[in-house]
Image: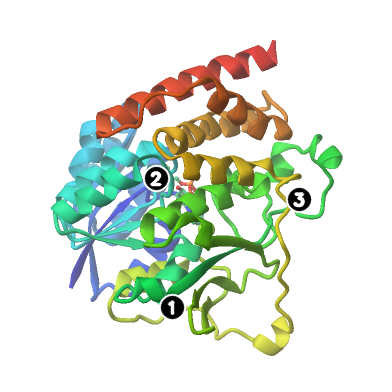
Amino acid sequence: MRTVTILGATGSVGTSTLDLVEREPDRFRVRALTANCDVERLAAAAIRTRAELAVVADEACLPDLRDALSGTGIRAAGGATGIDEAAASGADWTMGAIVGCAGLKPIMTALRSGGVVVLANKEPLVSAGDIVLAAARDHHATVLPADSEHNAIYQCFDFDRPERVRRIVLTASGGPFRDWSSAAMRGVTPAQAVTHPNWSMGAKISVDSATMMNKGLELIEAARLFPVEHDRIEIVLHRQSVIHSMVDYVDGSMLAQLGPSDMRVPIAHTLAWPDRMPTPMPPLDLVAIGRLDFEAPDPARFPALRLARTALDAGGARPAILNAANEIAVAAFLAGHIGFLEIAAIVEHILDGYDPPAPTTLDDVLHIDGEARRRTDMRVKDAVV
Ligand code: NAD
Ligand code: MG
């Protein structure tokens, strides 16, 4: 029996995780589930899985959650302390599936409780990679990546002989606008940007996929997770999203992980790790897929790729600023306040004007993150006026 906690249980990754957990009630027992404010979904999942604790991050939603859970014996909690309690539930396995740097503190709490901590939530690794991984080491927690590319690399990477790895190749679908000119992208609407050709995901990561900032964040995520030099991580456009990433060895062998574009596959790998578990996925029909295409990405049309690469190479506070500015800019785009091409332009502007010293503590990162958000908010307001 493995005890499970899901941070961000009502989102896209959270729902996929619940689907797997609920298929094997003899194997998994749910400790805690959290959401921002989606009481209906959270309460329903908590009741179905007989969770011990359900938490809403937004305290204003707690009375509704209490109502929805009254008489069930499931404890309801709210706010940052409630999320912290869920993250510290001491579960054998915790999924970090909150979106954005809002997941950073909960992930740190989960790592301090030990066990297996699965990171779908990539933004904390981008902003505070060293700090997150140091906490894992100090508290003997195991970090497993659920992001499909990083999970693929994890499955192919020889951690005993990292010096034998020549390259990591991150695959990218290219998002819905991979064939669009910059001029055409200028008029992209939020509805167009959240419609991904291969994956069904939350709104923020869908927009990141459309700008290709998602691949930029994943480049930084890969540099955090795998002991290879930055210039040995390449990005290749692969439209079919069948190969989820590759590891190239010095002898000329390249290992790839293939699978359907369904997050339940990488999540199942982490949920059963080091074992394997069945999922409802049919075997890949390679004949139906027919061909696998690869192309070079175009940083001229997708400047987010260049911004992320530069932030990674410069290090220090740059990745945290990149991420925070992007979170605010994406939210502003989704709210209809700025245009699609302005997302990367605003991120670049914030990076150019803010250069604090490298963070060494969690508080440093949170301060830089907050200041970058404040500056981006102001920039967005200027853009609107
Ligand atoms: P989502 O928007 O669908 O879900 C986010 C979850 O976090 C929800 O449960 C929501 O209630 C909760 N949440 C939102 N804001 C919160 C806050 N301030 N405090 C606490 N909880 C909050 O997002 P998603 O698509 O499931 O993505 C989650 C994370 O996983 C992201 O970091 C994303 O980059 C990463 N990821 C997602 C996918 C995917 O297929 N969706 C794939 C790879 C990586
Ligand atoms: Mg990914």
At horizontal 46% and vertical 24% (from top left) the residue drawn is 355
Q: Which mark is residue 98?
A: 2
- Residue 268 rendering spot, x and y as whole percentages: 39, 72
- Residue 106 rendering spot, x and y as whole percentages: 27, 42
Query: Camera-side residue: 307 or 124?
Result: 307
Query: Viewed as shown, does residue 342 lie left or right of 90?
Result: right
Vertical side of 245 occupied by 382: above or below: above
Q: Amino acid at mark 1?
A: Thr
Question: Can residue 36 be seen?
Answer: no
The Cα atoms of the two marked residues, 1 and 2, are separated by 23 Å
View extreme (top): residue: 385
CA neighbours of label 1 inside 10 A, class few (<14), some (14 to 19), many (20+): some
1 or 2: mark nearer the eye: 2
Q: Which quadrant holds residue 105? A: top left
Q: Amino acid at mark 3?
A: Phe
At horizontal 73% and vertical 66% (from top left) the residue drawn is 295
Vertical side of 354 occupied by 105: above or below: below
Give the residue number, with chain letter if any, for mark 1: 279
View extreme (bottom): residue: 287
Give the residue number, with chain letter if any, for mark 3: 177
Q: Which quadrant holds residue 196? A: bottom right
At horizontal 35% and vertical 80% (from top left) the residue drawn is 277
Q: Which mark is residue 174?
A: none
The Cα atoms of the two marked residues, 3 and 1, are separated by 31 Å
The Cα atoms of the two marked residues, 2 and 3, are separated by 26 Å
Q: Is mark 2 within 8 Å of ligand 1?
A: yes
Q: Which quadrant holds residue 275? A: bottom left
Query: Does label 1 or label 2 sit earlier along the sequence?
Result: 2
3 or 1: mark nearer the eye: 3
